[in-house]
Image (spheres, grey):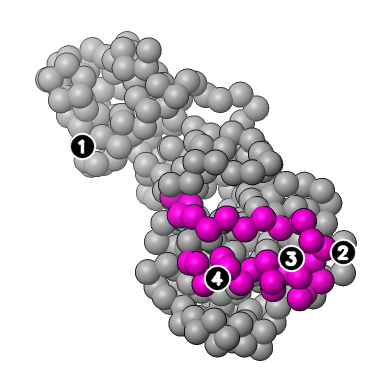
Amino acid sequence: MTDVRLLGAADIRRLAGELDVTPTKKLGQNFVVDANTVRKIVHTARVAPAERVVEIGPGLGSLTLAILEQGASVTAVEIDSRLASRLAQTAAEQGVPSGQLTVVEHDAMTIAELPGDPEVLVANLPYNVSVPVLLHFMQTFPSLSRGVVMVQAEVGERLAASPGSKIYGSPSAKAAWYGSWRLVGTVSRQVFWPVPNVDSVLVGFERSAEPLGSVAEREATFRIIDLAFQQRRKMLRQALSRELGGSAASASEILEAAGVEPTARGESLDVHAFRRIAQAAGRAD
Ligand code: SAM
C-alpha cells in the first residue's frame, strides 16, 4: 500500500465545482463519494502491487486513487475532456508517485489500443453503455485476464445468468464466450453523487485460459445468439429459419446436426451450443 489520500464527498464536490462539472445522465456520471466503497471494489478485484490495471471512466478519480493506493499502475480511459485533463493533477495532489497513472482521453466504446497490455479491468461503468463497453474490451484486449466492474443490478444479474433462467439473454451468452462471470457484491445507492435511481452490483470475471474459438467463429456465434434472442419466445427452428437455409425444415436439420433440439428456445442454450450451431451452419470457418 502506498500513502495515497482517497477522495471524500467534500473533495468530489470541490473538484466538480472547480471544473464546472454537473454530472450528466448521458455519460452515466454518478461519482462514488465513499472511500470504503472504492477500497471494497479494489479488494474484491484482488489488485496487487505492480499489476497493470485499466479503468474505464475514472471520472474525478475516486476509484482510480484506491487502485493506485495498492501500488498498481493504472491506465484510465475517460471520454469527458474536463475530467480527463484534471485527473493527473488530482493524483499528484493526493500523493500518487508520478509514472503510476496514464490518462487516455477516448471513448471506451471505440478505443483500439492501450499502453502496456493491462491485465486487470476495474471500473464503475457508465450504466447506459456497460455491456457493449465490456464486450468491446474483452474482444479488443486479450491481455485482460480478470476484473471487477460495478454495473446496474439488472445488468449484473444478466451478465452472470445461466441458461434456463428468466434473465438469461444475449449479454449472458456473449459474455460467457470470454470466460466466467459472477456477482461478487452489492453497492448502496447512497455512496454516489448524484444518488442514482437504480441499484448497483459488483460483477467479477475470469477470462478462460484458451479462447473458445477464432474471431470468425465468435462473430458467427454472436450472430446466431442475436437472432435467437431477438425472438426469444420462438422455437429455434423458427427464430433461425431465415439464417439457416430459409425454412424451418432446413433450420431443424442444421440444429440437429449441432446436437440442439429444433424445438428448444435460445434461453436454454449455453454458448457452446450456439457455437455448434454456427459451425453446423458453416458460418464459422
Ligand atoms: N469512476 C468514477 C467513480 O467511481 O466515481 C466515475 C464513474 S461514472 C459511473 C462513469 C464515468 O464514465 C464518468 O466519468 C463518465 O464521464 C465516463 N464515461 C461515460 N461514457 C464513457 C465512454 N464511452 N468512454 C469512457 N468514459 C466514459
Residue 220 placement (x, y as % from top left): 34, 25
* Quarter of the view holding residue 3: bottom right
Spatial separation of the CA atoms under disc 3 and disc 1: 47 Å
Q: Secondary structure at mark 3?
A: helix
Amino acid type of the residue tagged 3 in the rendering = Ala
Q: Quadrant of the C terminus?
A: top left
Disc assigned to residue 234: 1
Closer to the chain start, of discs 4 and 1, is: 4
Type of amino acid at the residue the image marks with label 1: Lys
- Check disc 4 and report the residue beneath it: 83
The residue drawn where x is 61% and y is 24% is: 210
Q: Nearer the viewer, residue 242 or 138?
A: 138
Q: Is 111 in front, or is 239?
A: 111
Question: Could you give the CA–CA distance between mark 2 and mark 3, rounded to whole angstroms?
Answer: 10 Å
- Above or below residue 112? Residue 123 is below
Quadrant containing the N terminus is: bottom right
- Residue linked to disc 3: 66
Q: Up-down: is 106 above or below 197?
A: above
Marks 3/4: CA–CA distance: 17 Å
x%, y% of residue 85?
Answer: 58, 68
Kindly identify the residue that appears in the image at 48 percent across and 66 percent down.
Answer: 80
Q: Is residue 173 magenta?
A: no
Residue 215 drawn above or below residue 187: above
Q: Which residue does the numbered mark 2 point to in the structure image?
A: 2
**Which three-letter amino acid code belongs to the residue tagged 2?**
Thr
